[in-house]
Image (cartoon, helix red, strand yellow):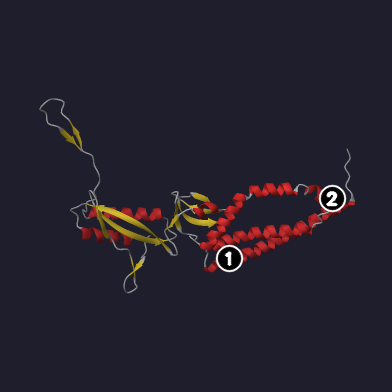
């Protein structure tokens, strides 16, 4: 079977190659400019809206240039009649498949405009997911978990969930601690030791200001009387770049060591087991 192509086919094919090559060059130049512009804007502040719109602009540039490129092609040419004959069916299938993509893009747009969190914020979602915001794309938000763990959450999902932001509109994060001490402990001494341990940590920073406007660490409070302990509570502040787990580890280690060194009792639950005597008249044996 012999297949022949007339001169119009080769002319259409050559025109297609030229148009697509020019479109590719224009896309490359615009993406380069887009990256440079947003890099300059990010010098002052790398806001989540800038990250999202940089990614969004990439998509808009590519789609817009491709539309213009195809518009420049002769739609009546024989090569396009065969290639685009089923455009209506293909468009319907693509539109149906793109519903989730559109929802995620709109969700990302709402996040970038409302700014419920920024890059570097530690957030907790209503489903229990906790992490530090690392990045946002057209379709999802990337959270940093423990170690090298990365949590990918679709924009549409995170936009509709209730969340806790531990550093909303602040350059620092905070975490609350509770320390139990024994009923007979010196409360004033315990407060002093806990406060000193927090100040000695290399990961904590002053998060409040006194009446004179000087930065200070959080106060230690005698918050409640529990069943078997007196509860001391304090809020610790630390930079957004420090993992919360590292702060908790260091503060707990320092406070525990300091309380033990100064003989401050740290209560703990224990179980008392009583062995009933097998013989009449024998005394029960208690074991702890």
Residue hosting label 1: 39
Q: Which mark is residue 78?
A: 2
Residue lying at 58% horizontally and 53% vertically, measured from the top left: 103
Where residue 41 sits, quadrant-wise, is bottom right
Residue lying at 65% horizontally and 59% vertically, measured from the top left: 60
Residue lying at 32% horizontally and 53% vertically, measured from the top left: 252
Residue 201 shows in the view: no
Image-based side of 269 in relation to 244, left or right: left
Residue 221 shows in the view: yes
- Residue 6 position in % (x across, y down): 89, 49
Q: Residue furthest top?
A: 279
Image-based side of 282 in relation to 86, left or right: left
Where's the C terminus, which quadrant?
top left
* Mark positioned earlier in the residue sequence (1 or 2): 1
- Residue 279 position in % (x across, y down): 13, 25
Q: Secondary structure at mark 2?
A: helix
Along the line of sight, which residue is nearer the eye, 248 or 184? 184
Q: How far separated are the C-alphas under marks 1 and 2? A: 45 Å
């Amino acid at each position: 079977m012999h297949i022949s192509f007339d001169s119009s086919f080769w002319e259409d094919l050559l025109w297609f190659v030229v148009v697509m090559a020019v479109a590719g060059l224009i896309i490359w130049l615009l993406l380069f400019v887009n990256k440079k512009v947003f890099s300059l804007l990010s010098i002052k502040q790398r806001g989540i809206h800038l990250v999202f719109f940089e990614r969004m602009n990439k998509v808009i540039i590519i789609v817009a240039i491709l539309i213009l490129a195809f518009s420049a092609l002769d739609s009546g040419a024989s090569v396009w009649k065969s290639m685009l004959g089923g455009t209506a069916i293909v468009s319907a299938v693509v539109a149906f498949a793109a519903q989730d993509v559109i929802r995620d893009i709109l969700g990302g747009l709402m996040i970038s405009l409302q700014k419920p969190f920024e890059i570097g914020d530690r957030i907790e979602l209503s489903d229990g997911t906790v992490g530090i915001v690392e990045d946002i794309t057209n379709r999802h938000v990337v959270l940093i978990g423990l170690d090298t763990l990365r949590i990918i959450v679709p924009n549409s999902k995170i936009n509709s969930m209730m969340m806790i932001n531990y550093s909303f509109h602040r350059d620092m994060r905070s975490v609350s601690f509770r320390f139990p001490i024994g009923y007979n402990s010196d409360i004033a001494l315990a407060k002093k030791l806990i406060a000193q341990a927090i100040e000695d940590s290399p990961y904590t920073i002053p998060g409040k200001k006194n009446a004179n406007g000087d930065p200070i660490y959080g106060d230690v409070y005698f918050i409640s009387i529990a069943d078997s302990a007196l509860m001391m509570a304090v809020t610790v502040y630390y930079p957004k770049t420090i993992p919360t787990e590292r702060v908790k580890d260091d503060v707990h280690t320092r406070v525990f060591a300091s309380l033990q060194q100064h003989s401050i009792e740290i209560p703990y639950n224990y179980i008392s087991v009583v062995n009933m005597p097998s013989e009449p008249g024998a005394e029960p044996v208690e074991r702890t």
